[in-house]
Every structure is written in structure tokens, then in C-alpha cells.
Amino acid sequence: MTVKVINKSANPLPAYATAFSAGLDVRADNADPIVLPPLGRAMIPTGLYLEIPAGYEVQVRPRSGLAAKKGVTVLNAPGTIDADYRGEVCVILVNLSNEPFTVERGERIAQLVLARHELIEWAETDTLADSARGEGGFGSTGVK
């Protein structure tokens, strides 16, 4: 799948870390360091602008290493970049640790995953088909 991209940053384009990676690592493109205090959040620029094909979205997901080692994650994970959005890709990071975290330019801050989606056409009805699960939810599976 080809996705057109404008890269206004000094960073390389997002890349897969391994041959079977699902997400491409995306890097921060902030001019100055951004300090996230404990429980602080900020929109981190990437310098990237995408033209995503219709029927697809790009999901912005956390990097597991950043979350596990530093307590920093993507606030609205997964974030969605719609096919008709043409602005700069920014990542909303939140610091869930007890220590300040500094985002430096060029740091890998998130992953981007291309995902196909379908558009919904609603069919209003008065009834739904029965299922084995029924209305059970919120931890109800496997409970008798």
C-alpha cells in the first residue's frame, strides 16, 4: 500500500523496526525540548503530512518500550488519522509516571499503523438476533 507523505522534519520517514512489525516508529519534530511533568500532556509535532487512501485510517499507537520504561503513552490510543485530514500529524503524549519526561527532537514517540475500515450503513430495527452471550459485558464472559 502506497501512502503519499510530505516530510517537513529533519527526521527520516517512519520505518518498521523489524520485518514483521505492524507499526512504523514515528519521531518527534519539536524545535525545543518539551518537558512533560507527571500527569502532563502535550501535542508533539512530527513534521509529517499524509494522504491516506480512502477506506483506510492511520492509527497512532503507543510504543511499548516508552510506556514500560518511562510511563509515557499516547493519550487517546489509538488515535485516528482520517483519510481526508491533510494537516500535520501530531501525537498526544501523556506522562503517567512520577518523574518529568523530556521529549527531544528525533525521539521515537509512537507507532503508526495503517488499518482498513468499512463505512457503516445503519439498518434501524426493533429487534436483534439472539446470541449465546446476550447482554453480558464488562467482565461477564467466563463468569457463571
Image (spheres, helix red, strand yellow):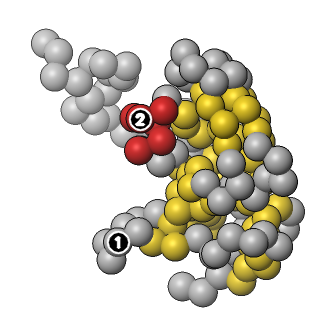
Label 1 belongs to which residue? 18
Q: Residues within 10 Å of mark 1 (few under 14, many from 20)?
A: few
- x, y percent for residue 77: 57, 41
Q: Report, in whole angstroms, how far the alpha carbon at label 2 lies from the one at label 1.
A: 20 Å
Report helix, strand or loop for mark 2.
Answer: helix
Q: Is residue 141 above or below residue 25?
A: above
Q: Is residue 34 above or below residue 58?
A: above
Crowd around label 2: few <14 · some 14–19 · many ≥20 (10 Å):
few
Tell me if 25 is positioned left or right of 65 in this view.
right
User: Is 81 in front, or is 123?
Assistant: 81
Q: Report the mark closest to the observer, 2 or 1.
A: 2
Q: Position of residue 126 (x, y in %)?
A: 55, 33
Tell me, yes or no, if residue 59 can be seen here. no
Query: Image check: 66 left or right of 34?
Result: left
User: In front here: 37 or 90?
Assistant: 37
Instruction: Name the outermost residue toward the bottom.
Output: 2
The residue indicated by pointer 2 is 69
Give the quarter of the image for residue 94. Answer: top right
Q: Residue at x 67, y 43 (%)?
A: 103
Q: Which quadrant does the N terminus fall into? A: bottom right
- Residue 67, how many percent across, how many down? 46, 36
| Quadrant of image for the C terminus | top left
